[in-house]
Every structure is written in C-alpha cells, then in structure tokens.
Amino acid sequence: MEAAKLIRREERRNSSTGSMTNIYHLDGLIKAAAKAPRAGRKGKPKLTVVPKGGA
C-alpha cells in the first residue's frame, strides 16, 4: 500500500529511547476510496416514468 502511495508511513524516533510507534497518513487511501464508486458510473442516470399513483 505504501508503494501504491495509498498510505504514507512517518517513522518516529527518540534519541534517548530509540524507536517509537509510526504514524500512518491515510490521505491517498481516502482519495482512492472516494473515487472508486464514481469510476463505475458511466454517463447520466437513466430516468424512467413512474405512473401516477406510485411505483
């Protein structure tokens, strides 16, 4: 996921204690998820006439 630029890992270090937990930035993943439903749509939605009185 990092190679696909969906997530970005920020390594954190402390000079006295060494490694700390990483921070993960999910901006790319969020953008890809928001774009996914739109990618499947093609053109305008098809409209249908509903008879008077409901469906």
Image (cartoon, rainbow, N blue to C red):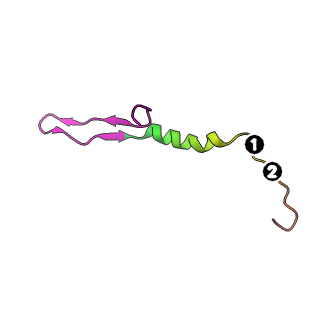
The label on residue 47 is: 2
The verdict on residue 18 being magenta is: yes
| Residue at x-position 42% and y-position 41% | 26
SS type, badge 1:
loop
| Residue at x-position 31% and y-position 40% | 23
Assign the C terminus to one quadrant of the image.
bottom right
- Residue stretch in magenta: 1-24
Q: What crowding class fits label 2: few (fewer than 14 Cα within 10 Å), some (14-19), or many (20 or more)?
A: few
Assign the N terminus to one quadrant of the image.
top left
Would residue 40 appear left or right of 14 to someone viewing this image? right
Quadrant of res 54: bottom right
Q: CA distance from mark 2 to mark 1?
A: 9 Å
Write down the residue under mark 1. Answer: 44
Above or below, 52 relative to 30? below
Q: What secondary structure predominates along the stretch shown in magenta? A: loop
Quadrant of res 27: top left
Amino acid type at mark 2: Leu
The label on residue 31 is: none
Would residue 20 appear left or right of 30 to someone viewing this image? left
Above or below, 52 relative to 46? below
